[in-house]
Every structure is written in structure tokens, then in C-alpha cells.
Amino acid sequence: MVTYVATLDVPRHVVDHLSRLLAAHRRRLRTPRGSRALGPFRQAVLVLRWFRERACVHCLARDAGVSQATGYRYLHEGIDVLADQAPDLHDVLNRCRRDGMTHVILDGTLIESDRLAGVRDNGNDLWFSQKHKAFGGNVQFLSSPDGSPLWVSDVEPGSTPDITAARIHALPALYKAATDGLPTLADKGYIGAGIGIHVPVRRPKGKSEQALHADTRTTNTLIRDLRALGERAAAELKERWRALKHVSLSPSRIGDIARAALVLNRTWK
């Protein structure tokens, strides 16, 4: 076996922040000093390596000198501690209004995972997305006008359409925000979402875009151009925290993992 020196490309203050959260969590549990195999800082490094490098838990545990079972326990504990710090949707929308934002952007993304048993009423796989042709979980997220991620929802099975997931996790709060002067922009997957959710008008079936009125085409162009920046939010989270590209843990944990990545992303800046 060959040993080598590696560098974790995460700012030191992010590691320190997570280690403080883990230390506070241990104090709440009244964990006796010295009873853990790893201290809060080394546990934070293990968790951040998984998020940043998408490394296998077996390798992380081996490098840290703990068993694989302990490595999984430390990883899940870190995910839970971070996810608990994620902002509430109502708080996010209130802050957006206070900051004078003109709108927020709603979108969904599939976070891929290993195959999971589960069948819908029609016999199709519950966690399989026909749209993306992959297994995973549907996560909704909000971003600011410049595309910065603001909020992430809990996970729904990959077969769930975006508008259905939005109705479960986001739309009631977004309706309230729209009445207070903060509208939401979304893509055509959210057609029929309701008042205050602005989406492009779909062209008549079998006809070109030119069949729409000039004012409607102009409105569609404006919505698309403004909403396009929201695509940056999911890309930023997935590229910076590579564990979101493919989750090897239980797909039911995808929502917590995504919220944990959001907290880390906010701490990074």
C-alpha cells in the first residue's frame, strides 16, 4: 500500500464552520469528550470530501482510520447537521422582498441515484424519470434574479413531474409572495401553476411560434431571458458539490443532501 499527501480544495472557513456545527451537535447529545473515533474537524473533512469529491465511503473511512460503518454514520450525521441549517421557504421569500428583488426563479432538477425498488400504480418504476431516462429524485429549487441558489425542497421520486413537486413543496408560499409583490418565473413545465407564476405561453399545436400574437412572443422572450439565469443555480450546486451528480446513498436522502449542499454553498461565499 502506498500513502500520499492530498489537498481538499475547500476554503478553510467552510471546514471550520462545519466542525463547529458538529461540535455543537455533540454537546447537545452530551457526547463524552474523547469517546468518538474522530474529532469534529476530522469528521468535517470526511463529510466535505464526500460532497466535494464524490468519494466512496469505504475509502473515506479507510483514510480516516475508522470502520466503514462508522464512516457512514459520521457522513449521515454531517448531512443531518447541515440540512438542519437550511433556510425555510417563507423566510427566504421574506428576505427577498426586504432586499428589493423583482422576482424569484423556480425550477426543478433530477439528482440521479442508484436504482431503487418501487412501482407506480401504472407499473412504471417510481424513481425512474422518463424525461431524463435515469433513476433519481426530483428536487425543486428557487434562485435569485442573478441565478444564485436560495432554497431547495425535499425530494420527490424521479417520476414526479415538476409541477406536481412544486404544488407539494413550493406553490402555496409562492402564491402568498406574489400577492405581496414578488412574482415567480418558471418554464413551460409549470404551465397551469396558477396566478403569480409566470411561464411562457405555449404555441398552438402544429403551428409555429409566429402563430402567437407579437405581444405574447415578446412576453415569452422576456420570461425566457430572465428565467434562463435560474439554470445556473442547479449547475452551481452540482459542479461545486459533485455528490449531487449521482447519489449512492438511499434516494430518500437526496433532499437532505441537496439542502446540506445549499448550506455549504452559502458558507463558501
Image (tube, grey):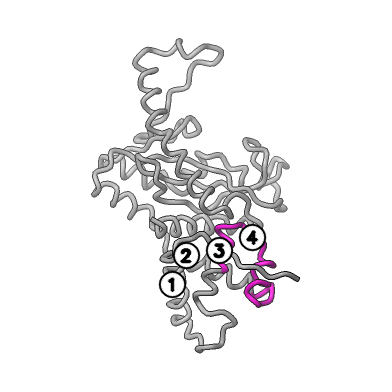
Residue at which label 1 appears: 21
The amino acid marked with disc number 1 is: Leu
The amino acid marked with disc number 2 is: Leu
Left or right of residue 6: residue 210: left
Residue for point 42% across, 58% down: 268
Magenta range = 46-70
Residue 29 at x, y = what percent?
48, 82
Left or right of residue 134: residue 144: left
**Which dot, 4 or 1, sits closer to the camera?**
4
Q: Quadrant of residue 1?
A: bottom right
**Mark 4 and mark 3 residues within 8 Å of each other at the beta carbon:** no
Residue at which label 2 appears: 82
Above or below 192: residue 17: below
The amino acid marked with disc number 3 is: Thr
Residue at which label 3 appears: 7
> SS at mark 1?
helix
**Mark 2 and mark 1 residues within 8 Å of each other at the beta carbon:** yes
